[in-house]
Every structure is written in structure tokens, then in C-alpha cells.
Image (cartoon, coloured by chain):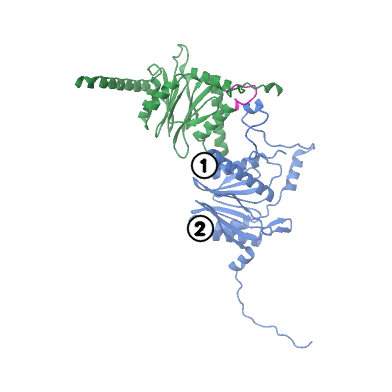
Amino acid sequence: MARYDRAITVFSPDGHLFQVEYALEAVRKGNAAVGVRGTDIVVLGVEKKSAAKLQDSRSVRKIVNLDDHIALACAGLKADARVLINRARIECQSHRLTVEDPVTVEYITRYIAGLQQKYTQSGGVRPFGLSTLIVGFDPYSGVPSLYQTDPSGTFSAWKANATGRNSNSIREFLEKNYKETSGQETIKLAIRALLEVVESGGKNIEVAVMTKEGLRQLEEAEIDAIAAEIEAEKEAAEAAKKAPPKEK
Amino acid sequence: MKLDTSGLESAAPVWGAPSELVDGFSAAPSFEVPNTTDFDGFQKEAIQMVKPAKGTTTLAFIFKEGVMVAADSRASMGGYISSQSVKKIIEINPYMLGTMAGGAADCQFWHRNLGIKCRLHELANKRRISVTGASKLLANILYSYRGMGLSVGTMIAGWDETGPGLYYVDSEGGRLKGMRFSVGSGSPYAYGVLDNGYRYDMSVKEAAELARRSIYHATFRDGASGGVASVYYVGPNGWKKLSGDDVGELHYNYYPVMPSTVEQEMVEVAGA
């Protein structure tokens, strides 16, 4: 036990936990991820780096489900993510077993955040280098939720949020353009936000949609179609901006 | 023996040992085992020695308006009646009741502990725990103490989001969901009256009367049951105690003394 009491995460003289802040840096280098909550739907979108030619892209799913009604996307160290996701999946089933009820989104977010916090206050371990976006529907109330956790172990609920690379730009875009939407409109908003920082195209982003019925991963073709719609709307807006001065 | 003090533990463990981070599961309570040639036989004898007969009558049933819970109030130690005024219906929280049969201390302690867990669940999750969840928590705890001499035969009755709920939980680790249960040495007698008179569409008054009568008949025939028949009703707004009648007096309600005609009167004989 003596070997494990050298803590890695300690306070600096001015009150910072540098290991946690370095973990946040690792998150900032990870792929962009965005989540948008609608009235009857929650959408997750993740930037996909172009797959190597020989790689089987199906084995690199970035949006995973924790249970039938909860899904997770993350930015940061993917290997850490795997560990966290496995523990969360076990907790979802354990909860079902002990209280015969599926977890609420808030409960599992609290669990994951608690886990991330534990690793900032124990000896011999480093914090998890990832932030997660957790979406889902609460089992009885049917209310959609979007939560975010980070390496320090804090979590909060969001109407829309982004994490990973260029998350500030995405968040700025969302703050400007967010409004209560539902169904297809929410999906479009999420993809528009992601396309602010990612090259357009179905093969560069992965999008999944959570409804009361469950999680659905969008096909490349679908994403391409929506991206094309967005492009067209953008061009129409540009054209409309240029037209009025001439008419005057 | 390690008691279940999870309701009293503080948040952070002092020794942040890595093993705690790796497993999700904590060890089950256990105690040292004696060296005997026939351990199974020894276990059986030990269980027989500590197993009280669960001298009591408790019952509960679900009907259209909610759940009716009733119990007697006698505590007996063998042939000695130690108390006629034991509270056998335990108030876990304002919308959930538990009944006591078996070891009084075991029932009281574990119901209190369950109340703590239910409250902690409410605080953590911002919503009440379901009757299903509460009964499962209790059943899991009792299962982990299986074979160690606990004697608990309880019914958890309550009203939650899904409506009225009734579960039977015992110290063997069993847990059953049902519409009608009776537990204790007087339960066969109570079942006879309860099963005969039960209908799903009863009013609260009718159901209360059925529960009261069932307890009365059990106390009449079973020596280990008696005292006061308490009847509680659990509805959408929580539980409410409806009545607590001494079974001696109830007897005369059901079998009033009929005045009989006197055929021959005894006359005082004057002198010796």
C-alpha cells in the first residue's frame, strides 16, 4: 500500500490542479464533438478523422450506447474512454438489477463524473483525459437530456454544447443560433454546428440521434444529404444578402 | 461481523486504495467459521436454535383503492406473553409501510435502515424510490446475511408512480410480488378469512373491515397472536392508520352475548 500513496494530482501553490488542467489540454486536442437537445430528440455529432485505407471503419464507432436509452460521445484519450464506458455500462445494468429500474441520464452522468473525480484524488493514478457528452431520455418522464462531464469530475446539463477541438467556435455558433427545435430541425442544427469546424461531407462526421425509441446512427448518405441541404440554405442566404442593395 | 453501515459511512474513504477503483463491488459480510467435522449439520442445528417461530399475524392486500395493511400486537417468548402492545406495522416513510414478523429487533433495525436508504435515494435522485426498488434493497441486504440467523418475514407496502405496490421479503432472501399476503403463525387462519372475503372492488371501509376480521380470527385461534388489531391504509397520498381495536372487544362485536331465557333460577336457601 505504501507504493500507492504518491499522489500524482496535487495542488499547486496558487490553487490549481495541474494534472487536471493538462487533462483538459488533452481534451482540447481531441476530435470535436457536439450535442444538441430538442423537444423530442437529442443529437450527437462527432468529427471523424479520415479513415486509413486499410482500417475497418466500423470498428471505430465514436458514439456508443450505455443502455437502450442512453448514449455517449467523447473527446480526448480514446483508450481512457473505453475504460469509462465499460464501467458506466456495468453501472447501468447494476442499477437495473438493484432497483428494477433503468438509470436516469442524470444518475449515470453523476456516476461517470464521480468516477472521473475519484481519479483526481487518489494515489498513483492520473485523471481520465476525456470529456463526455451524455444524452438520453429519462425512463418514466420521457424528458430528453444532454449532460457534459470533464476530467475534473464536474458535470452539468446543457441545451447544446461542444467539446474537443475548436469547441469554443462551435459553442459560439450554438449560442447565436440555438432555438428550441424538434426532429429533423435539431439534427440539422447539430450538423450545421459541427460543419463550422469540420470539412463538409458524410465521411468526416458521425451523427447519431436518440429518440424515445432508442439510438439511431445516421448513414453516410443521410448525412451527405443534410449537409447538401445546409449548403444550399447557406448559398440562398448569401444570395439574399447580395440582392436587396441592387433592388434599392 | 461486519454490519451494513453504508447508510452511515462518510463519502471519501481514508485509504484511497487502487483496488477500490478497480472493482465496482464491495465484499459481502462474513464471519469466522468454526472447525467441525460436519459443518452442514452444525449449520442446520444453529439455524434451528435461533429460528423463532414468527409468532404473529400480519397481512396486507392490494385492492382497487390502494393497499390495506393489518397486524396484531402480541410478542411472545415461548409460552410467555411478553407484550400485548407491540407496533408491528413500521412506518418506513410517509408513503411506505413494513410489517414485522420474526425477530422484533431484526425487523425494526432493518426497516429503519431501509428508511435511511430510501431517503438517501430521494436526496441523490430527486425522486422517491419505488416500492419495487425499496423491497429489492431490503431483499439484497437480507440475502447477504443469509444463514447468519436473521429472522425477518416482512411485507413492504406502498404507493409509488406506478400505483399500489406490495412485496413479501424474508430473511431467506426471498422476494415475491403479489396482491395478498399474510405472514406469521396466525397466517393460515387469516388467509382463510381473507381469501374468502376478498374482492378487488371493495371500498376502503369494506377492505378495512375485512382486514380487521382476518386478524381477529387469527388471534382467536392462534395463541401467539393477540392484543390489538391495527389496520392501516396506503393510498395515493401516503399511509393512514384507520383503527386499532382490542381483539378481546372485537370478539363481542362479532359474537355478541345473546340474552338467554332462564329456565330455573337458583334461590338463596335460608339457614344452613
Asked whether the viewer can see residue A67, the reply is no
Left or right, A224 with respect to B259, comes to left
Parent chain of label 2: B
Q: Chain of mark 1?
A: B
Q: Colour of chain A?
A: green
* Residue type marked 1: Arg
Q: Residue furthest front?
A: A14
Observer-side mark, 2 or 1, equals: 1
In front of the other: A236 or B206: A236
**Residue B234 painted magenta:** no
Residue under label 2: B204
The residue closer to the viewer here, B132 or B20, is B20
Name the quadrant of the N terminus of chain A: top right
Residue A117 horizontal side relative to residue B54, left or right:
left
Tag 2 and tag 1 share a subunit: yes
Q: Residues within 10 Å of mark 2 (few under 14, many from 20)?
A: some
- When asked about the image quadrant of residue B227, the answer is bottom right
Horizontal arrangement in the rendering, residue A99 relative to residue A231 (left or right): right
Q: Pick whichever of labels 2 and 1 is earlier in the sequence.
A: 1
Q: Which mark is residue A240?
A: none
**The colour assigned to chain B within the rendered structure:** blue
In the foreground, B186 or B94: B94
Is residue A108 in sight in this rendering?
yes
Magenta residue span:
A118-127
Q: Which structural element holds mark 1?
A: loop
Residue marked by disc 1? B127
- Residue B114 lies, in percent from the top left, at 61, 44
Among the 4 quarters of the image, the one containing residue B150: top right
